[in-house]
Amino acid sequence: MIDLHLHTTASDGYYSPEQLVDRVFLAGLQVISITDHDTVAATEPIKQLAEARGLLAISGTEITAVDHNQDIHMLGYFLDHQDEALEDFLADQRKYRIARIEMIADRLSELDLPIDISNLLAKAHQPGNSVGRPHIAQAMVSSGHVGDIHEAFDKWLGKDCPAFVPRTGPLPTTVIGVIHAAGGIVSLAHPGLTSIDENIKELQQAGLDAIEVYHSGHSVEDRDRYLAMARKLGLFVTGGSDYHGNEHHGGRLGRMCLPEVEWNRIKQYLN
């Protein structure tokens, strides 16, 4: 079984690399990719841990681009995670994340919903660590302002909500260039959740390599639509659970995987 969309504590995942590999192994997965947000900090430990369990771990990351105030998530695979230009780019991305976290916290204070972000900022300043809105949501739960992470996003942190702060980031074409320069291929993450169908042909013309067709948040109709679109545009197909290990993202490990035939198409291209 193949899952190319997993997260660890290096970004907003619940489990450390060690804990995640344990769970991946027990779930029967054979090929994985850790796609933490705007960081590759967990890549090397995951590769070593996976190899010790007889699993294949390919390098990956999930980079957030922005186009006309719309977040566009780009998955990079098979990239050189030690590429200097890539790491410099990701470091800038993480700085954007810290600034956004601070602005959201300020806005929550103005809304009489103060949270303590000192521990979150301490985590953010550790090498390679990436922070985001799920961390703010958890802080709101811990402060008693909301009952769970879903309520935090639905009432306060989601787009058009009172504490929402638009993201700052690079254009998708810039992200495609950065990943390609690091030797990787680029897949458009969960397009069914971001409603950017009209952008996909333009992204393909700019060098997009694949679409994430198989995703826990996609309906059967989404899956069929994006599979047909990938075939029409000559794009590869990727997929995974988007597993974070908590209530906000993904389901049980092993429930959403990339079909082996699609994995083989990518491998044949790379070989």
Image (spheres, helix red, strand yellow):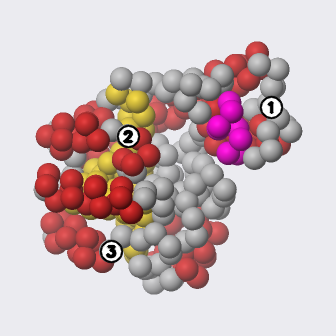
Question: In front: mark 2 or mark 3?
Answer: 2
- Name which residue lies at 57% across and 65% down: 251
Q: Main secondary structure of the magenta part?
A: helix
The region drawn magenta spans 149-156
- Image coordinates of residue 103 in percent, x first then y, are 64, 21
- Name which residue lies at 24% across and 42% down: 200
- Name which residue lies at 34% across and 27% down: 67
Closer-to-camera residue (112/36): 112
- Image coordinates of residue 99 in percent, x first then y, are 58, 24
* 155 in magenta: yes
Mark 1 sits on what residue? 116
- Type of residue at label 2? Ser
**Residue 143 visible in the snapshot:** yes
Which element is circle 2 on?
Answer: loop
Q: Residues within 10 Å of mark 3 (few under 14, many from 20)?
A: some
- Image coordinates of residue 40 in percent, x first then y, are 46, 51
- The CA distance from mark 1 to mark 2 is 33 Å
Mark 3 sits on what residue? 259
- The CA distance from mark 2 to mark 3 is 24 Å
Which element is circle 3 on?
Answer: loop
- Name which residue lies at 76% across and 15% down: 110
- Image coordinates of residue 8 in percent, x first then y, are 58, 57
- Residue 260 in which image quadrant: bottom left
- The CA distance from mark 1 to mark 3 is 43 Å
- Mark 2 and mark 3 lie on one chain; the one further toward the N terminus is 2
**Residue 33 visible in the snapshot:** no
- Mark 1 and mark 2 lie on one chain; the one further toward the N terminus is 1
* 123 in magenta: no
Q: Is residue 136 left or right of residue 74?
A: right
Mark 2 sits on what residue? 195
